[in-house]
Amino acid sequence: MTAGAALEARHLVKDFRGFRATNDVSLQIREGEIHAIIGPNGAGKTTLFNLLSGFLRPSSGEVRLHGERIDTLPPYAIVRRGLSRSFQISSVFPSLTVRDNVLVALESPTRLPGQFWTPLARLEALGPRADQILADVGLAGAHSRLAADLSHGEKRQLEIGLSLSQDPRVLLLDEPTSGMGSEGIGRVIALVRQVARGRTVVLVEHNMSVVAELADRITVLQYGQVLASGTYDEVRRDPRVIEAYLGE
Ligand code: ADP
């Protein structure tokens, strides 16, 4: 393994009924960096994300987290080893308050199999951590609102908060600015910078100005393969990248 690689893909392949969505992808995410995965629609970004987080099993190849092979583990075991992925909006409980959503996320990994309720006292003991997470994602003032009543941008903030409940060393964020206006995008950029302190962050992102602002390094995918990787300046001067984007 490359020294300092927090997360590594080695020769990853994913076939969907004969269609190769991920074609021999190798990449290293360095400890502590913000790494963006970009590429035209259909390039295989989501599939790669699902492979890295254990939501899909590779057809062949390996995923290693801090050197340990994780591609054979179920998602919950990967979360326990310190890799967590931003929850999709669908995992936010709309009828619960913002704070209760975080409490549920904090509590659920510790629940015993078959146990469907949690003593109130145990939930309340998690309160200070929930409040800290809400403060970290800028939702302290919204703690008692129903999640259903949040704006789109606030829901994305809550999703990031839910993934922080596992205190991951490596955080995967799937298009954190999607569907947002410029004000919301500015807030997410600040938030990602903050949650990246002391963590490794991998994000899929379409908005190139967000990528330019946030990413230490970038991997560009096309047709399921790595087209280029490097810093923003290195990648944007690469003739293959220019061609891929102009040809979209
Ligand atoms: P991106 O996120 O870059 O837009 P995806 O990873 O979603 O790309 O998709 C890459 C390719 O794999 C696309 O052509 C898509 O149609 C195909 N694909 C993704 N998931 C499946 C699936 N479950 N079954 C069949 N084809 C899939």
Image (tube, grey):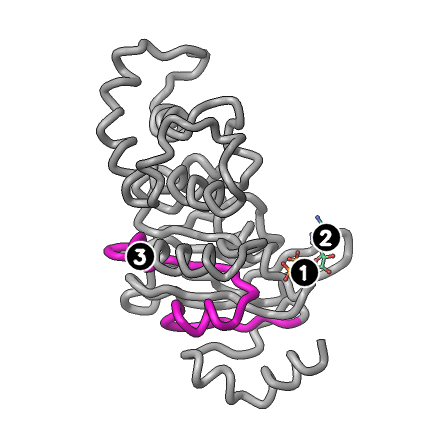
Question: Which portion, as a residue range, is magenta?
Answer: 193-222
- The CA span between labels 3 and 1 is 29 Å
Residues at marks 2 and 1 touching, judged by CB atoms closer than 8 Å: yes
Task: Examine the rendered structure and indicate whether residue 58 appears above or below residue 125.
Answer: below
Measure the alpha-carbon separation of dots 2 and 1.
7 Å
The numbered mark at residue 217 is: none
The residue furthest right is: 18
Q: Residues within 10 Å of mark 2 (few under 14, many from 20)?
A: few
Specify the amino acid type for callout 1.
Ala
Q: Quadrant of residue 25?
A: bottom right
Q: Is mark 1 within 8 Å of ligand 1?
A: yes
- Give how far across and how far down residue 186 sits, in percent: 42, 61
Mark 1: give few (<14), some (14-19) or many (20+) Cα within 10 Å: many
Q: Count the marks: how many?
A: 3
User: Which of the 4 quarters of the picture holds residue 103?
Assistant: top left
- Disc number placed over residue 16 in the picture, else none: 2
Q: In the drawing, does residue 15 fall left or right of residue 101?
A: right
Name the mark nearer the viewer: 3 or 1.
3
Q: Which amino acid is tagged 2?
A: Phe
Amino acid type, residue under disc 3 in the picture: Ala
| SS label for mark 3 | loop
- Mark 2: C-beta under 8 Å from nearest atom of ligand 1: yes
User: Could you say where residue 19 lies in the image, as x and y percent from the top left?
Assistant: 75, 59
Q: Residue at x 58, y 67 (%)?
A: 24
Q: Secondary structure at mark 1?
A: strand
Residue located beneath label 1 in the image: 21
Cα gap from disc 3 to disc 2, whole angstroms: 33 Å
* Sequence-first tag of 2 and 1: 2
Whether 198 is among the magenta residues is yes
Which residue is label 3 attached to?
Answer: 196
Q: Nearer the viewer, residue 85 or 162?
A: 162
